[in-house]
């Protein structure tokens, strides 16, 4: 590195700060009431002291020669030697491009090194510095000047003191981007005057304010702690610059004149070396609306449960312990709520058949839903009722439960039994009924067999071909396939095909079932053909009359 000439007396200008690099170097500083020293330190000693400083220091002679730069200054400029930095002010200008943070380039004559050569004293000038050979790699410097004068008061040595604040600027830039992009509403208040200096889009969307309505206003004008549950504590912490814990508040904002429910918290931070308070907010309106909707839904469910005319219960999934029963349950089965709530249905003996209860519980556990399960339930005081039980697994207050309804079909089942008995009595002698009436009565009397299709259930004599009717008649008379073949003069295989067709159409698989099917429709040993002939004769006689 270049060495300075030694043995020259020098003092620092009145702009030197106590504790600065000049003080550390042992320079004599002109201060009111203090006489300059007559034995200044040697220049080589000055370089040795400056070399160990963490601040970058550049020494410039009045003739614009750059005589010295310590390691920190060279590193901050991205060079390793004084030659790469520039031995003169003019070379320094040619080697480096300087601009303000606003990207505006500095003109020659406005570089900090030009200003100190002109004898100007300045503090905290922030510039972005890049070498002309690699302008993509820039650094941000905060620079102040120091003018050292001789005993006559003339500039003798000019000093630039440089701080590399690139990391700080990058951190602030990252914070700015994160603050602006954060969807969570936030604003920053300066603690010295309690004015808002930053606000993000989330806060503007939450409140309905415009940016210009917030920036520069005080916390007294836009009270972010309005109606806070611990307002006094929050105010006290704000004045002390301490963390404000989370608390609920209600903001009066343009977007909601009735007040906006939020959770607000404050965290002290520094922005540009100024103490500030970062306020963050969580909007409680969606939660409040969801809670209101849930409460209304629960109220509607409770009313529907209580007023339902069908006996209904709510029980646990694990052991079917009753949690609640409605009025219809108490009215139909006779059990009061206090008698059954808290007990499993197994202990109450509510089901007449334990096998039925176990099948019901197993099916519910497997599918989570059951419809129209037939069961008998005990009524308090004796007796039982026939029920269709339907159940569904539901979640109530974050707990899985079983909603179960019991439809009393005792009266309907009794009416059905009475109707069947009446039909059986009528069909004991059905010779005077028409074929259609007989078939309808048979359909009412016999429910569909498992696996039967609707077409098979609705099958009637009219669906059979003439040959199938003849075969059915002979089957009802107890004749075998060979006998039927001889009587109808058909091949044995043809008879078998007709019998198979009857099986298919009527949904049966045995000859005895064919006979039962025919007799249930009022057809006895005299055969289907005779019945049809008799019916046709009756119709003709009726028409002649």
Image (cartoon, rainbow, N blue to C red):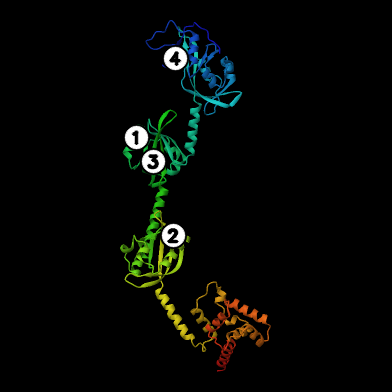
Q: In terms of sequence position, does the residue under pointer 3 or pointer 2 come before the other?
A: 3
Q: Residue furthest bottom?
A: 545
Q: Are marks 3 and 2 in contact (CB under 8 Å)?
A: no
Look at the numbered disc 2 and give the secondary structure of its residue: strand
| Disc ID at residue 237 | 1
Question: Where is residue 110 shown, x and y percent of the image?
Answer: 53, 20
Q: Is residue 449 left or right of residue 411?
A: right
Look at the numbered disc 1 and give the secondary structure of its residue: helix
* Residue designated by label 2: 393
Q: In terms of sequence position, does the residue under pointer 4 or pointer 1 come before the other?
A: 4
Q: In terms of sequence position, does the residue under pointer 3 or pointer 4 come before the other?
A: 4
| Residue beneath the point at 50% across and 32% down | 173
> Is residue 494 depicted above or below 344 in this figure?
below
* Residue designated by label 4: 24
**Tag 3: Cα neighbours inside 10 Å, few (<14), some, or many (≥20)?**
many
Q: In terms of sequence position, does the residue under pointer 1 or pointer 2 come before the other?
A: 1
* Residue designated by label 3: 264
**Tag 4: Cα neighbours inside 10 Å, few (<14), some, or many (≥20)?**
few
> Is residue 316 depicted above or below 97 in this figure?
below
In front: label 3 or label 2: 2
Give 135 or 525, whichever is nearer the viewer: 525
Q: In terms of sequence position, does the residue under pointer 4 or pointer 2 come before the other?
A: 4
Question: Where is residue 183 shown, x and y percent of the image?
Answer: 47, 41
The quadrant of the image that shows the C terminus is bottom right
Give 157 or 316, whichever is nearer the viewer: 316
Inter-mark Cα distance, 4 to 1: 40 Å
| Residue beneath the point at 46% across and 13% down | 25
């Amino acid at each position: 590195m270049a060495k300075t000439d030694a043995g020259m007396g020098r003092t620092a200008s009145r702009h030197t700060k106590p504790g600065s690099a000049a003080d550390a170097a042992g320079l004599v500083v002109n201060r009111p009431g203090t006489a300059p020293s007559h034995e200044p330190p040697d220049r080589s000693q000055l370089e040795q002291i400056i070399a160990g400083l963490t601040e970058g220091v550049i020494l410039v002679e009045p003739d614009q020669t750059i005589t010295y730069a310590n390691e920190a200054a060279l590193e901050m400029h991205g060079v390793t030697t004084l030659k790469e930095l520039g031995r003169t002010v003019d070379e320094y200008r040619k080697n480096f491009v300087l601009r303000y943070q606003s990207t505006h380039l500095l003109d020659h004559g406005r570089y900090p090194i030009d200003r100190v050569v002109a004898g100007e004293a300045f503090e905290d000038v922030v510039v972005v510095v890049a070498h002309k050979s690699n302008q993509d790699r820039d650094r941000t410097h905060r620079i102040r000047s120091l003018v050292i004068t001789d005993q006559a008061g003339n500039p003798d040595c000019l000093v630039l003191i440089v701080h590399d604040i690139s990391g700080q600027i990058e951190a602030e830039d990252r914070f700015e981007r994160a603050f602006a992009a954060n969807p969570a509403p936030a604003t920053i208040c300066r603690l010295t005057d309690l004015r808002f200096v930053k606000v993000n889009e989330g806060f503007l969307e939450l409140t309905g304010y415009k940016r210009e309505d917030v920036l520069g206003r005080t916390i007294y004008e836009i009270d972010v702690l309005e109606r806070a549950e611990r307002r006094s504590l929050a105010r006290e912490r704000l004045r002390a610059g301490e963390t404000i814990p989370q608390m609920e508040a209600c903001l009066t904002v343009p977007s909601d004149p009735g007040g906006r429910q939020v959770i607000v918290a404050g965290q002290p931070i520094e922005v540009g070396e100024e103490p500030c308070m970062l306020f963050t907010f969580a909007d409680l309106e969606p939660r409040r609306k969801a809670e209101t909707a849930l409460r209304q839904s629960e109220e509607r469910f409770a009313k529907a449960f209580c007023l339902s005319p069908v006996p209904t219960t709510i029980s646990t999934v694990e052991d079917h312990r009753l949690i609640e029963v409605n009025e219809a349950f108490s009215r139909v089965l006779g059990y009061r709520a206090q008698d059954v709530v808290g007990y499993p249905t197994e202990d109450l003996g509510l089901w007449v058949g334990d096998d039925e209860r176990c099948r019901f519980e197993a099916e519910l556990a497997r599918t989570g839903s059951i419809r129209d399960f037939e069961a008998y339930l005990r009524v308090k005081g004796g007796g039982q009722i026939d029920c269709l039980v339907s159940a569904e697994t539901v979640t109530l207050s974050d707990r899985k439960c079983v909603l179960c309804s019991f439809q009393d079909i005792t009266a309907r089942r009794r009416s059905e039994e009475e109707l069947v008995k009446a039909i059986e009595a009528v069909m004991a002698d059905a010779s005077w009924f028409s074929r259609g009436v007989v078939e309808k009565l048979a359909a009412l009397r016999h429910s569909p067999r498992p696996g039967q299709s609707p077409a098979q259930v609705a099958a009637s004599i009219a669906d059979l071909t003439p040959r199938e009717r003849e075969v059915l008649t002979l089957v009802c008379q107890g004749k075998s396939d060979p006998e039927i073949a001889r009587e109808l003069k058909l091949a044995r295989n043809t008879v078998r095909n007709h019998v198979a067709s009857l099986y298919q159409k009527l949904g049966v698989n045995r000859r005895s079932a064919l006979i039962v099917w025919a007799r249930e429709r009022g057809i006895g040993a005299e055969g289907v053909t005779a019945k049809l002939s008799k019916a046709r004769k009756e119709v003709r006689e009726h028409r002649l009359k």
